[in-house]
Amino acid sequence: MISIVGTVKGLIIGLLNGVIRTIPKTNSKILNGILKVVNFLITVYVEVFRGTPMMVQAMIIYWGYAYMNGGASLPLIPAGIAIVSINTGAYITEIVRGGIISIDKGQFEGAMSIGMTHTKTMWHVIIPQVMRNILPSVSNEFVVNIKDTSVLNVIGVTELYFYAASAAKNSYKIFASYLIACAIYFVLTFSVTRLLRLFEKKLAGKENYTVFGSQTDTAAEIKIDKEGE
């Protein structure tokens, strides 16, 4: 659950950051100054959370909150979700930025020429294409999160690795306990990977299709095969 919710929230963070980082300059010096500061903060956020291990981030966020609140700590599951979301958001921010850059600039210009604002252009024209392009990378982040949630045991989150470690200590069957945990992780990641690839194929649509150039003239039909010919 932590990996699913954390990946979804991380995707939302990444999309918002990606949209903000592509806002064009305005005629207002104040707005441009604010935008520059926000972009700087996003850059710092991305560099810090991509450049440090999630385990260290978990310790700093969880115990840092307790330090600032007189020892009152966060609930474990919400804390775990927040840590995974923030970490994932940093990676997906760069993935989204790359996806937006890959879209032809002519689509931005075309949308602006018909009076669409930057926000409407992003949500109605650019983001749908970006989501399709970045889906493999986001899927990979989800699979990584399934494995990386094991580091949350350092703050007491009871997940698969935690139970494997407990079983190893109680039964003294260390190799068997961790081997079973490894097999469960493999089954989870393998199943999720296959399901996500199936979803990607469904999203891509049919390999062969027909473009109708006219509603009345069948000669105007253009058949497209998987090579685009």
Image (cartoon, helix red, strand yellow):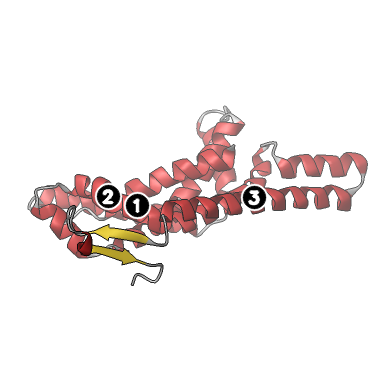
Q: Is residue 141 visible?
A: no
Work out how far the residue at label 3 is from the one at label 2, CA to CA, in angstroms. 35 Å
Q: Residue 78 sits in which quadrant?
A: top right
Q: So how many labels did they put on this image?
A: 3
Discs 1, 2 touching: Cβ within 8 Å: yes
* 66 or 116, nearer to the observer: 116
The residue tagged with tag 2: helix, strand or loop? helix
Relative to 26, 88 lies left or right: right
Residue to which mark 3 is pinned? 191
Is disc 1 placed on a helix, strand or loop?
Answer: helix
Q: Amino acid at mark 3?
A: Ser
Residue 148: image x %, image y %?
Answer: 62, 50
* Three-letter code, disc 2: Ile
Query: Where on the picture, by quarter, is residue 39?
Result: bottom left
| Mark 3 surroundings within 10 Å by alpha-carbon count, few (fewer than 14), some (14 through 19), many (20 or more) | few
Percent across and percent down for residue 189 are 64, 52
Residue for badge 1: 42
* Mark 3 vs 2, N-terminal side: 2
| Residue 20, disc | 2
Question: Spatial distance from mark 3 to mark 1, Cα to Cα?
Answer: 34 Å
Name the residue rendered at 43%, 58% in the picture. Answer: 47
Residue 182 or residue 125, whichever sits in front: 125
* Residue 60 appears left or right of 38: right
Find the residue positioned furthest to the right. Answer: 172
Picture quadrant where residue 53 is located: bottom right
Front tag of 3 and 1:
3
Rate crowding at label 1 as few (under 14), some (14 to 19) or many (20 or more) other CA atoms within 10 Å: some
Instruction: Give residue 221's position: percent from left, percent from top.
Output: 25, 62
Q: Secondary structure at mark 3?
A: helix
